[in-house]
Amino acid sequence: MVHVIILAIVQGLAELLPVSSSAHVIVAEKLMGLDPTAPQMTLLLVMLHTGTMLAVIVYFWQRWRRAFFRSVPEFRDFVVALIVATVLTGVVGGGITEFTEKVLMRHQPHAWVEQLFGRLDLIAIALALAGVFILVAGLYENRQRGTVAARKLTPSQYSSIGAIQGLCIPFRGFSRSGATISTGLLSRVARSTAEDFSFALAVVLTPPADAREIWRLYQSQHHQLAGMLPAAAPSIVGVIFAFLAGLLALKWLSRWLETGRWHFFGIYCLVAAIVVGYLHHTGF
């Protein structure tokens, strides 16, 4: 239970900051002697995502109402943007996952892309790429300060955000919020709009991710539901702690984004990539 609470706090803080929660949770799991590739651990990670999803809904609900629910046309446009972006996420992320499992991992029985989640070398590379992306987007957005940014998403903007989100699904370390918000900033979307839409996408994406991991655990337990209960019970406690930590992280994120300090998260990701790379080099 202590492990679950620690992981929930790490997940809740890192999930909603653009620093890749999965990378932080995987390293924390390894530090505590846990196996990040085990089905029980991936289920716990997804359940912690559910806690942060609830934090997102509570934190953003009033902002979403003001931004997207003011009229029927605005709500319709918002729903269309979510659908298109989510479909593109599935196409890109699902395509990469299928290619990884069916081609790159074809010699492994019952291959799942989650089996790569314990690879610190891959996590370090993804963290570095995310760090560069966030750093570039933050510096670019700061240079454009004073110019008018779009408050309403265009089809090309929400399509590019959805596609880039697809890259984050199979690559642990490539921050979902960092990638989607940075794509919005580079597309000249207003900061608040990019943040609102990014986390609305997260709410849509979490239930399918939950279902995939529950199915994976169900298969690993030879289709016996009883074997899933020991892994599911501690997860409920984790959801609560992830929810509370997520609310704190969202306040931090919004403040730094609105004050032009987005690029600091990119610097952090680059430092984290070096640390993770060093851990891999030492054989950790």
Image (cartoon, rainbow, N blue to C red):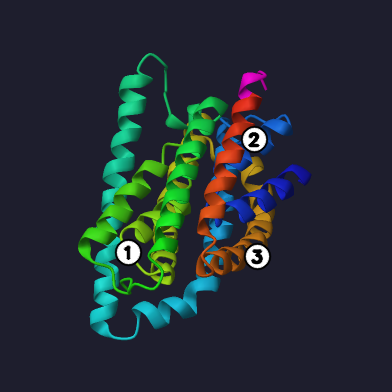
Total numbered labels placed on residues in the image = 3
**Marks 3 and 2, how far apart at CA:** 22 Å
Magenta region, residue range: 280-284
Residue 73 sits inside the magenta stretch: no
- Residue identifier under label 3: 248
Tell me the number on the disc at residue 165: none
Residue 10 position in % (x across, y down): 66, 49
**Residue 76 visible, this orientation:** yes
Q: Nearer the viewer, residue 284 or 207?
A: 284
Mark 1 is on which residue type? Arg
Disc 2 packing (10 Å; few <14; some 14–19; many ≥20):
many
* Among the 4 quarters of the image, the one containing residue 190: bottom left
**Element at label 3:** helix
- Residue identifier under label 1: 188
Q: Residue furthest bottom?
A: 71
Name which residue lies at 40% across and 50% down: 208
**Element at label 2:** helix
**Marks 1 and 2, how far apart at CA:** 34 Å
Quarter that holds the C terminus: top right
Mark 2 is on which residue type? Val
For marks 1 and 2, give the one nearer the viewer: 1
Residue 105 position in % (x across, y down): 38, 20
Image vertical order of residue 219 relative to residue 259, above or below = above
